[in-house]
Image: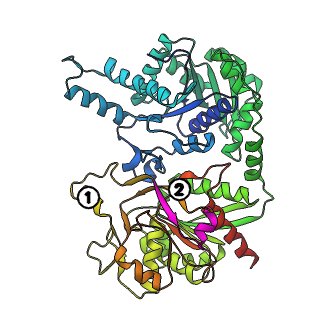
Amino acid sequence: MAREGHKYIFVIGGVMSGVGKGVVTSSIGLLLQENGYSVNLVKIDPYLNVDAGTMNPTEHGETFVLKSGLETDQDMGNYERFLGRDLTDGDYVTSGMVYQSVIARERALEYGGKCVEAIPHVRDEITRRILAAADHNGSNVSVIEIGGTIGDFQNALFIDAARVLRVHNPDDVIFVMVSYLPVPSTLGEMKTRPTQHAMRELNSYGVQADFIIARATQALDDRRKEKLAISCNVHTDRIISAPDISSIYEAPINFEKDKLGKALLDALKLPEKQKVSLTAWKKFAAAVANKNAPEVSIAIVGKYFDTGDFVLSDAYLSVIEAIKFSAAKLGKKAKITWVNSKHIESGDKGALAGLANYQGIIVPGGFGESGIEGKIKAIQFAREKKIPYFGLCYGMQLMVIEYARNVLKLKNAHTTEIQKNSEDPVVDIMLDQKKHLAENTYGGTMRLGAYPAHIKKGTIARGAYKKDVVEERHRHRYEINPAYVERLEKAGLVFSGTSPDGVLMEIAELPRSVHPFMLGTQFHPELQARPLDPHPLFTEFLKAAADQKRK
């Protein structure tokens, strides 16, 4: 049973995916939170993967790791960034999780010998998870995004669960449809017909949307609003125009101008608790959008860029956003360029030499052998040319390998992830991970989630954090081999962050006297960067990069 008085907003996509349901959900959460309501945001992904951890980034974008260690969809990152706080495991649901729970209960005879079916048992498990997330968070309002679009076959059970919840709680459940209105270049006119069809598809489930968020390249005019109102049975005041914007962080500001927050509260029969100002948010959004801010050129050297003829920047979404947040704080504008490490690896001298044109270089996380030697060459270039470098997870491991090869002269230094019988395994698998690999238990078994790290005094990391103990999120199986730490330190590398017991190397860096900024983290600092609270290591990196230009 739903908690009495608790409200639910379901956000559903019409026409096509990828038009901003996650941003709409995040914006609604922010507006309600700013109005004084406690909010929890839930992402429902209809795929059969139990979590997002086993998917290739080119398939579904980056994997966002929660504090608990749950590997989730990248929309969860937007939720955390907009709300400015951590989310919980219950705020993420996949078809895989749902079916896994139902089957486990059936195997344990918890259904009392009944024939277990999609309706009602799978549908009821979906509802149970939605209600449990609300109870766990103790929130006033749940905003639930159902991934994909209305017409997706795999979404039927989730939409039906929302429908039944509304049947039992008619005053507490509303639906928001995010739909796309194309403007064909050959016609030059915005077309409402796809959205009309999407609404009829939704109606076929027994659901009527209360709001339409009309995504388009340009603002919706009154004529189009009238057409949608009549054909979709939605009042014009509840058809909200959402034209393309320069930054997703402008979305809640635009929605507030259109009084979306108040309209949602009215629909839910909730009073306005306080005036929504969004003062700090507006200041941040203006800084991000400031075209006159001094540019800082950053190269991201990675390999998850190839998806046909297109570049998939979503593979590194949190890294991109973390850069934006720190740049905005410093009054700068980051100009990011994608550099495919496979081009450097192939011997393209121009690709390597071209790195000299950037003020900073980042090698983000990743897995596997492809493009690795190209990344190592890029790291060596950054070290020798004194270009500020920031390595994230794999980027730190490769930074240490490069240092071992070219400073310690261990020419065969490598990671056992790539070279199992490496002569000098500078990076090796963690002991507790060997069993998982031997048994092929890959999903959800890495070192995941938040762990503490002790930061050494007098280091770049300590200067950035300004505290001696921090907590950061991890996602990896391999670590710096303790057998090589002493030699690396004698050669000048500083391990400025370690696990509390001193066994695991969490941060590696070179002193300022040697390099303006050469630092790598075994964890993923980008996962905790927030618009109004940028991550200190990203800020310190961008400071060094900006100084590079002046020199």
Query: Which residue bears the numbered disc 2?
Result: 316
Work out whether residue 272 or residue 364 is closer to the camera in this orientation and state it: 272
Front tag of 2 and 1: 1
Instruction: Give x and y (percent) for residue 83.
Output: 61, 39
Residue name at image x 77 percent, y 48 percent: 286
Asked whether the viewer can see residue 441, the reply is: yes
Using the rendered view, name the quadrant where residue 259 is placed: top right
Looking at the image, residue 114 sits to the left or right of residue 268; the answer is left
Residue name at image x 46 percent, y 81 percent: 489
Instruction: Give x and y (percent) for residue 233.
Output: 63, 14
Looking at the image, residue 302 sits to the left or right of residue 228; the answer is left
Looking at the image, residue 474 sits to the left or right of residue 122; the answer is right
Q: From this view, report whether residue 369 is shown above or below residue 259.
A: below
| Quadrant (top left, top right, bottom left, bottom right) of the C terminus | bottom right
Magenta region includes residue 74: no
Question: In terms of secondary structure, where does tag 1 sit?
Answer: helix
Looking at the image, residue 145 sits to the left or right of residue 429; the answer is right
Magenta region includes residue 460: yes
Q: Amino acid at mark 1?
A: Leu
Magenta extent: 451-465
Q: Which mark is residue 437?
A: 1
